[in-house]
């Protein structure tokens, strides 16, 4: 999947937020933590780890929204470190069930935050691709949900979110 349009949209949103919020400092660590939080929220909505509960996962649209919240921060982190030259979603597969993939994705994000290089960045994308496969979410659905959430993020900025 081509990431060029998503990087462009995210760069424009980031610029808008930075101007609107008067952000003058490096916020890479804050965005890194935000990505980890969004991944946690996604895991929570899937309920894949909640062996003690009989309640099923949240509705598909809720899960998809949490997924693209992560994608916003993943794109933004790449822009911060000039890794937005990544043109296509890297392919690869991460072994394990959904819980195991979430745990490995946390590790991949921590590795990227520490290393800040293209190899570790691509690895995070591969992990997110595997999560999408496990959730049976298509790239088309991801793009559509990203565009919708991107618009909502602008509205939130305009209304003092």
Image: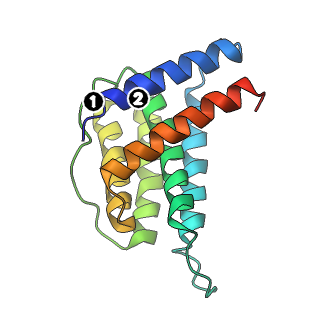
Secondary structure at numbered mark 1: loop
Please identify the quarter of the rendering in which residue 159 is found. top right
Query: Which residue is located at x 54 percent, y 63 percent?
Result: 43
- The one of 112 and 124 positioned closer to us in this rendering: 124
Q: From this viewpoint, is residue 119 visible? A: yes
The label shown at residue 53 is none
Q: Position of residue 134 (x, y in %)?
A: 35, 67
1 or 2: tag closer to the N-terminus? 2
Give the residue at x 54% y 43%: 35
Q: In the image, residue 109 lies at what x, y percent? A: 45, 45
Mark 1, Cα crowd under 10 Å, few <14 / some 14-19 / many 20+, is: some
* Residue 23 seen in the figure: no
Mark 2, secondary structure of its residue: helix
Count of numbered circles on the image: 2
Q: How far from the left and from the top, in percent, is residue 26?
A: 59, 19
On screen, residue 128 versus residue 52, left or right, reads left
Q: Is residue 135 above or below residue 33?
A: below
Q: Residue at x 61, y 49 (%)?
A: 37
Q: Hey, which residue is sitting farthest right in the picture?
A: 160
Identify which residue, 160 or 46, lies in the foreground. 160
Label ID, residue 78? 2
> What is the C-alpha distance between the residues marked 1 and 2?
9 Å
Q: Mark 2 and mark 1 in contact (Cβ < 8 Å)?
A: yes
Disc 2 crowd, CA 10 A, few/some/many (<14, 14-19, 20+)? many
* Residue corresponding to mark 1: 86
Q: Quadrant of the C terminus?
A: top right
């Amino acid at each position: 999947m081509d990431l060029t349009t998503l990087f462009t949209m995210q760069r424009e949103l980031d610029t808008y937020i930075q101007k609107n919020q008067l952000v003058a400092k490096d916020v890479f660590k804050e965005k890194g933590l935000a990505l980890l939080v969004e991944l946690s929220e996604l895991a929570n909505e899937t309920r894949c780890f909640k062996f003690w509960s009989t309640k099923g996962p949240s509705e598909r649209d809720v899960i998809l929204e949490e997924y693209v919240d992560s994608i916003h921060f993943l794109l933004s982190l790449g822009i911060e470190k000039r890794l937005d030259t990544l043109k296509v979603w890297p392919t690869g597969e991460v072994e394990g069930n959904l819980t195991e993939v979430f745990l490995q994705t946390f590790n991949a994000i921590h590795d990227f935050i520490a290393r800040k290089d293209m190899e570790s960045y691509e690895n995070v994308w591969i992990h997110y691709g595997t999560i999408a496969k496990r959730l049976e979410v298509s790239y088309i659905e991801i793009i559509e949900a990203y565009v919708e959430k991107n618009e909502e993020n602008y509205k939130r900025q305009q209304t003092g979110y």
